[in-house]
Amino acid sequence: MDGMLQQPNPHAALGTEPIHTIGKDELKAKLDRGDDFRLVMALNSWAFEAKHIPGSVHFDTPEELYAALPPDDEIVVYCSNVDCLSSVAMYRDLVRRGYGNVRRYSGGLLEWEDAGLPLEGSFG
């Protein structure tokens, strides 16, 4: 350090704690088994209508999400790809609110589609 002030990280508000993740194969296995968990797409309703992983749910507002999902639910959040921060922000918010069993599927729609796995929606 040369005494100059460091610029704040633009993603600092998202937090620095490690994110618990789930991989494509494990997520697919959970869906195939019909495990009791909530798969939440963290993009807007237009994106959800266009394309989403089967079994996903979407909420227009954080309030709807918190009203619909009890804190002890198992939740997996995802968005478009590994660089998409929507699912990171949703993950952080859920954990901050006391949800104890949350994971991020970081590969998102892009990895899922590239693997040839099924999609639902008007462009699926």
Image (tube, rainbow, N blue to C red):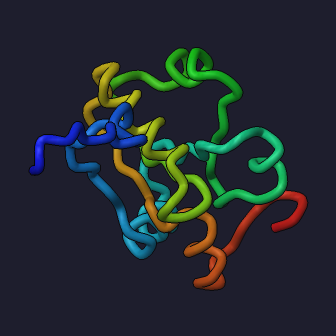
Which residue lies at the image location 41% right of the left edge and 75% below the top edge? 25
Which residue lies at the image location 70% right of the left edge and 57% below the top edge? 52
Image quadrant for the C terminus?
Answer: bottom right
Q: Quadrant of residue 109?
A: bottom right
Give the x, y percent position of residue 75: 42, 41
Front residue of 85 and 108? 85
Question: Looking at the image, is 18 positioned above or below residue 45?
Answer: below
Furthest toward the right, the residue is 122
Is residue 55 shown left or right of residue 87? right
Question: Looking at the image, is 15 positioned above or below residue 62?
Answer: below
Give the x, y percent position of residue 104: 40, 52
Give the x, y percent position of residue 114: 63, 82
Question: Looking at the image, is 67 positioned above or below residue 3?
Answer: above
Q: Is residue 74 visible?
A: no
Which residue lies at the image location 55% right of the left edge and 64% below the top edge? 81
Which residue lies at the image location 62% right of the left edge and 19% below the top edge? 64
Question: Looking at the image, is 72 positioned above or below residue 123?
Answer: above
Is residue 36 shown left or right of residue 1? right
